[in-house]
Image: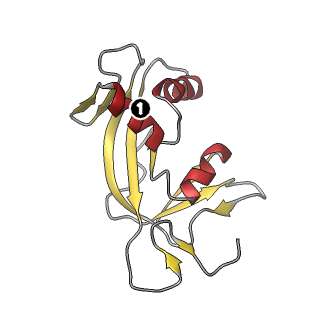
């Protein structure tokens, strides 16, 4: 099983099921692997973000480039170039815009482009009651 740790600003979107992807420098899992989602790992504030562990549904090589480029995002063989595609992709990863996403990766990795892997996940849909399978949370638990 693979664990992904998320910075505090990404924890809530992951926990609510709004963010179902993560970009990492290395391939962290394979399609079909269960993933554990955490925030604050290696601290006393560590907590798991989902009761039910999601399953990896996709791993794709990715290149993030300068927003001024004609094709700023490459997902495997797919090139994202329209403003609508680029913005939707950035929002799916928890950013308000591709420019914000690019600045985050540029500062974090100190490079003008980023090469890594996009990991996507989703939850299985068993027939158990009391679980919101869309986000892997027990709906009967106190908030």
Quarter of the figure with the C terminus: bottom right
Nearer-the-camera pick, 19 or 64? 19
Give percent across and percent down for residue 140: 62, 81
Instruction: Determine the residue located farthest toward the left in the rendered image.
Output: 77
At 66% from the left and 79% from the top, the residue drawn is: 141
Which residue shows up at 52% across the image and 28% down it?
105
Q: Residue at x 43, y 21 (%)?
A: 113
Residue carrying label 1: 87
- Left or right side of 141 for 133: left
The spot of residue 56 in percent (x, y) is 37, 59
Task: Name above or below for residue 4 compared with residue 82.
Answer: below
Q: Quadrant of residue 109?
A: top right
Callout 1 environment at 10 Å: few (<14), some (14 to 19), or many (20+)? some
* Secondary element at tag 1: helix
Counting from the top left corner in percent of width and height, residue 94 is at 52, 42
What colouring does the structure picture have? secondary structure
Q: Residue furthest bottom?
A: 128
């Amino acid at each position: 099983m693979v664990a992904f740790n998320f910075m505090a600003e990404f924890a809530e979107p992951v926990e609510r099921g709004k963010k179902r992807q993560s970009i990492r420098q290395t391939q962290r899992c394979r399609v079909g692997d269960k993933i554990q989602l955490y925030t604050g790992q290696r601290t006393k504030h560590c907590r798991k973000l989902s009761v039910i562990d999601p399953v990896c549904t996709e791993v794709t090589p990715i290149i993030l480039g300068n927003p001024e480029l004609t094709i700023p995002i490459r997902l495997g063989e797919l090139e994202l170039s329209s403003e609508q595609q680029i913005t939707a992709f950035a929002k799916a990863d928890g950013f308000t815009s591709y420019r914000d996403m690019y600045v985050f990766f540029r500062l974090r990795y100190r490079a003008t482009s980023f090469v890594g892997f996009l990991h996507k996940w989703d939850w299985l849909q068993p027939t158990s009651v009391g679980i919101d399978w869309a986000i892997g949370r027990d709906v009967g638990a106190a908030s």
